[in-house]
Image (cartoon, grey):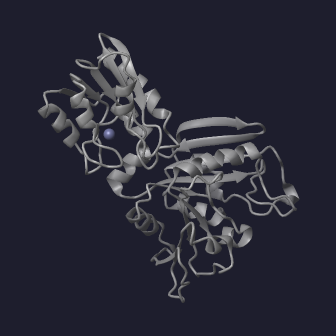
Amino acid sequence: MAADINFMKSAMLLARKGLGNVEPNPAVGCVIVKNGKIIGKGWHKKFGGPHAEINALKNCKKSPAGATMYVTLEPCCHFGKTPPCTNAIIKAGIKKVVAAVQDPTRKVAGKGFKILKKAGIEVKTEICKTEAEKLNAPFFKFAKTKKPWVIIKWAQSSDGFLSRNDKKRWITNSASRKDVQKTRKKVQAILVGINTVLADDPMLTVRPDRGKQPLRVVLDSQLKIPRNCNLIKTAEKTPVCIFTTTNKTKIKQKGVEIIKIGKYKGETDLKAVLAELGKRNIQQILVEGGEKVITSFLKRKQADEIIIYTSNERLGRKGKVKTSQIMKNLYNRFKINHFDKRLFTKDVRLTGLTK
Ligand SMILES: [Zn+2]
């Protein structure tokens, strides 16, 4: 048992390497063990690429026949972008498979285990299950609820301003902004409110462009979005989804989808927005503000992960919009877990999960 946990932890460390490159797939790691020693290891490196099990089998220094495979998720049994891993495991003569947790997606959901058992392979599961679920929390949340994992991000000055009225554009430094690009890269959608569009005319894309851009989502209850803004102008290449509560004339342009949504206590119904995005297969969404939108998400408790960048600059009179009470008192309102603090030169990044 102790050995099982140690090997699974090694597999888990490998899995982590894929985070940021495999989404919306889960990050998976795998080690193959023979006579108490690891003879092969692998992980799922990027979306569309070979799975962890295949990479580990290829990496084996000696024949994997008769070996035990430790993998952080139930092996797949369906043809997706790659052939099923169960076939390769059976063919390689693996004797035992230890998987941290069952794959929650309907396509697998225990079927992978069944196929392996039928082929005479011993299967053991629920080793480091909690850690495995945490590792791919957005993937598990989406499989369970069909709603995206919500990451709330904002940048503030040391005195709590979210924007400035001098000629400078940014609140935080380039290292922090580069870090934001990493988060943008792993999500399937980025959301802002109409005020952010009107104030900043953002592009909301991942830079550098690797061809796969997240869906750009705007909450615009009165449909005030200007037709000549960057989002609409580039919608044909990178789609835009606008949620509104009015029946106003629709913007008819390729790449722009307008969705009428109901209200909840006078505001756009965020739960309904998330359900709609879930239907569009958005597994993770990054909410980038501004103050009004972030406050609504926090008030309705629709936040799974929170990322705050704070610069060391005091803006004082140069500051424009300040954080709301709920943003300021986040730690009193939520039980923040898995708290992490990191420095980006003089900026501080705080991250945490709300559950
Ligand atoms: Zn697979």
Which residue is situated farthest in the top direction here? 35
Residue 272: where, in percent of width, then height? 42, 69
The residue nearer to you, when weighing 93 against 73, is 93
Q: Is residue 166 left or right of residue 96?
A: right
Residue visible at 28% across and 31% down in the picture? 126
Percent across and percent down for residue 22 are: 46, 44
Q: Is residue 270 above or below residue 115?
A: below
Name the residue located 55 percent from the left edge and 58 percent from the top edge.
Answer: 213
Residue 95 at x, y percent in the picture: 21, 22
Q: Residue at x 20, y 36 (%)?
A: 113
Quadrant of the image occupied by residue 5: top left
Q: Nearer the viewer, residue 79 or 190?
A: 79
Q: Can I make out residue 30 in this image?
A: no
Residue 4 seen: yes
Image label count: 0
> Is 137 situated above or below 197?
above
Q: In this rendering, is residue 125 above or below 353?
A: above
Residue at 77%, 50% in the rendered image: 157
Q: Quadrant of ligand 1?
A: top left
Instruction: Tell whether 213 sits left or right of 157.
Output: left
Query: Quick one: quadrant of the N terminus?
Result: top left
The relative height of residue 153 versus residue 259 in the rendered view (above or below) is above
Identity of the residue furthest to the bottom in this view: 249
Query: Residue 143 at x, y = what percent?
Result: 34, 51
